[in-house]
């Protein structure tokens, strides 16, 4: 038989549990305060809270943004078989400096005071250099991977980046004061044979660590340091040969293989095979336009570590499988 008295009592009990749980878990009220408000003892309030959890009214979840990012890093590391991954949180407004700081910290953990560090160019590399802490590594040496662009953005060009990194580390640096791209393949080949150029590239090939940016080949995302050389003819060649990324002066397709573009043959830079031999290569890049490019360089195993932001990291693991 229906019992109105039991129903009323159950309702009152439910409302009491809900009131106590909300005050304690949502309002951060002390148990003694709640006891005074509802006219019960502190021990009774404690029992009511335990009952609220037991009946499923209260669910406690312990989490932190770093835990979420750590899980994301682990997913990318496993999927792409890459040694280390660092992901910056999406909750910050300054992705450039936050991601750069993570890249700087990771780079230094693989350096010593006598390290030779090879670097490329671009905004992400510049952001990383800007976040490096001061050191007194007098025997360290920074060396460029490629020639200079001579662009209107000198702060992202290799000579300036080498100087800035060496200044922060307190060590030495080399520059490669020759154009990144020459008018002809013949001129580029001749320049690579010049003693000062070949010595620089040999030193870069023997570096302990490398810091590299990753370039997009999309019209909307192509690097500003390359745009002056991307003629309509070159762009058609890039599309025809299905290049997906630009890395240290070379084009790479979606499977990670080097693509023979005429622009590459006119470029003064470290060979991709030599880049792979550097013990620890850190790639830093972020942004929607970089997702396909990052997939390509990860597929080709050109980097040992990746530093990116949360949005890019999520895109890298979404609907994608790698053999």
Image (cartoon, grey):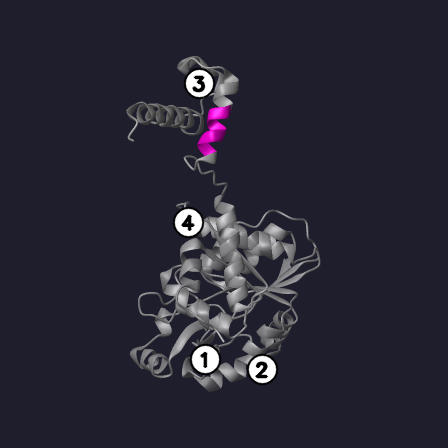
Residue 264 % position (x, y): 45, 80
- The CA distance from mark 4 to mark 1 is 35 Å
Residue 23 sits in quarter? top left
Residue at 45% across, 72% down:
296
Q: Secondary structure at mark 1?
A: helix
Residue 317 visible in image: yes
Name the mark nearer the viewer: 3 or 1: 3
**Is 160 one of the magenta-colored residues?**
no
Mark carried by residue 90: 4
Kindly identify which residue carries mark 1. 264
The residue sitting at the bottom extreme is: 186
Q: In the depicted view, which residue is nearer to us: 30 or 49?
A: 49
Secondary element at image label 2: helix
Look at the image and say whether residue 50 sits in the magenta stretch. Answer: yes
- Which residue is identified by label 3? 34
Secondary structure of the residue carrying tag 4 is loop
- Residue 312 is situated, as x and y percent measured from the top left of the image, at 41, 59
Marks 3,2: beta carbons within 8 A: no
Which mark, residue 193?
A: 2
- Main SS of the magenta segment? helix
Q: Residues in magenta?
A: 47-53
């Amino acid at each position: 038989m229906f019992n109105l008295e039991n129903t009323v009592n159950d309702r009152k009990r439910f409302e009491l549990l809900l009131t106590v749980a909300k005050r304690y878990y949502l309002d951060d009220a002390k148990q003694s305060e709640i006891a005074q408000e509802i006219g019960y003892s502190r021990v009774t309030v404690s029992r009511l809270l335990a009952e609220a959890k037991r009946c499923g009214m209260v669910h406690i979840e312990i989490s932190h943004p770093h835990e979420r990012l750590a899980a994301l890093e682990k997913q990318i590391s496993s999927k792409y078989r890459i040694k280390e991954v660092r992901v910056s949180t999406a909750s910050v407004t300054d992705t450039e400096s936050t991601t750069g700081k993570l890249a700087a910290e990771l780079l230094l953990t693989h350096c010593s005071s006598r390290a030779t560090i090879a670097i490329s160019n671009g905004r992400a590399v510049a952001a990383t250099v800007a976040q490096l802490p001061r050191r007194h590594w007098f025997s360290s040496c920074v060396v460029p991977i490629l020639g200079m662009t001579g662009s209107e953005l000198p702060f992202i060009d290799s000579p300036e980046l080498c100087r800035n990194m060496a200044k922060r580390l307190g060590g030495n640096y080399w520059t490669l004061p020759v154009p990144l791209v020459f008018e002809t393949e013949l001129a580029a080949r001749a320049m690579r044979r010049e003693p000062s150029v070949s010595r620089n590239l040999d030193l870069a090939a023997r570096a302990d660590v490398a810091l590299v940016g990753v370039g997009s080949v999309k019209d909307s995302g192509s690097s500003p340091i390359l745009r002056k050389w991307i003629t309509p003819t070159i762009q058609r060649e890039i599309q025809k040969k299905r290049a997906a990324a630009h890395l240290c002066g070379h084009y790479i397709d979606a499977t990670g293989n080097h693509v023979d573009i005429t622009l590459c043959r006119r470029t003064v830079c470290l060979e991709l095979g030599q880049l792979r031999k550097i013990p620890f290569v850190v790639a830093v890049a972020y942004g929607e336009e970089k997702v396909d490019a990052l997939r390509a360089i990860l597929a080709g195993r050109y980097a040992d570590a990746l530093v990116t932001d949360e949005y890019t990291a999520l895109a890298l693991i979404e609907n994608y499988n790698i053999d």
